[in-house]
Amino acid sequence: MSKQLVEKIKNWGAELGFQQIGITDTNLMQAEERLEAWLENGFHGELDYMARHGLKRSRPALLHENTQSIISVRMDYLPETSIEMNHTLNAPTAAYISRYALGRDYHKLMRQRLQKLADKIQTEIGEFGYRAFVDSAPVLEKAIAEKAGLGWIGKHSNLINRTAGSWFFLGEIYTDLILEIDAPATPHCGECQACLTVCPTQAIVAPYKVDARRCISYLTIELHGAIPEEFRPLIGNRIYGCDDCQLICPWNRFANLTKEPDFHPRKRLNTQQLLDVFSWTETEFLTNTEGSAIRRTGYERWLRNIAVALGNAPENVEILNALNARLTISSELVREHISWAISQQQKNFSV
């Protein structure tokens, strides 16, 4: 397909708010080998969907028939500076929420933009086969983006761009068009080990290898049952996800704040206090997280996570009273974490 069409696709993408667009083919054999090794090690924990779809994840034509090319896009989402993030993270009674989840759920916004991009292509060339994805199907989005030149997969397993850091979302259009592809990105982590060192739970077990079972994002979002006790003190005040490996990454000095109003914090989610969010009723939780990715964790796990964070907070009578007040009215899962938090608070009082 002509260079002119590829140039138009990239220009249209910029008009739609994507910071970069790259195009690649469908050969993901190296990524497939890495995925299979990761699964064999059991690093996926309860992420059964990572293994459920067989080879569809690494062989695009099995997911969308006759896929010939993949259009990969990225969109910045960083809503505030690293100084502001670190301020919240270092305030033990503040509720830290991963910054990708402070605004509107990115799935909806990016899928709509990808659809508009596909519509523009269709207006230009007529009917063509395609399917758009935003973290919504078995797609190796980071491997695809790396091949499409959007960045390289860092030692923490996130995609890093030399001029934009790693605070961005990814999306794809699988298409039957044969498009001119971009050169893949080359790695630039060098000898840096900052992300491995800073990880609170040492989930990055080796460069480029993350054991999800140890990752705070997995523990607070994906894990449905009890958080293992060994990790609870390490979670600190992180109640939904973790950004430490991105915060420490030197390449993020080049990251830009998002220009998308929908990614700006809603309901003061970037400045909430643990006791305040712990007091929310389920109705308040649903209201305050409407349109947010946070809803996926559900009210029960939301309380579970906050209970752990309260247990990690400095001793405080108000915290102890709040924990005791919820103890008898919570589910078995939440009660178990509240009981642990109470014991932690009591230990602090006795020291």
Image (tube, helix red, strand yellow):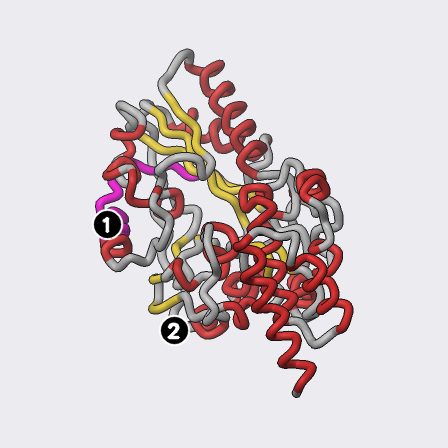
- Residue at coordinates 65% horizontally, 75% vertically from top-left? 345
118 w.r.t. 231: above or below: above
Decide which of 25, 287 is in the foreground and name it: 287
Decide which of 281, 179 is in the foreground and name it: 281
Which residue bears the numbered disc 1?
30
Counting from the top left corner in percent of width and height, residue 183 is at: 34, 45
- Residue at coordinates 42% horizontally, 25% vertically from top-left? 5
Local SS, label 1? helix
Residue 27 drawn in magenta: yes
Q: Amino acid at mark 1?
A: Gln
Which residues are the magenta region? 21-36
Residue 46 drawn in magenta: no
Q: Residue furthest front?
A: 328
Which residue bears the numbered disc 2?
191
Q: Amino acid at mark 2?
A: Glu
- Residue at coordinates 62% horizontally, 40% vertically from top-left? 292
Counting from the top left corner in percent of width and height, residue 26 is at: 28, 36
Local SS, label 2? loop
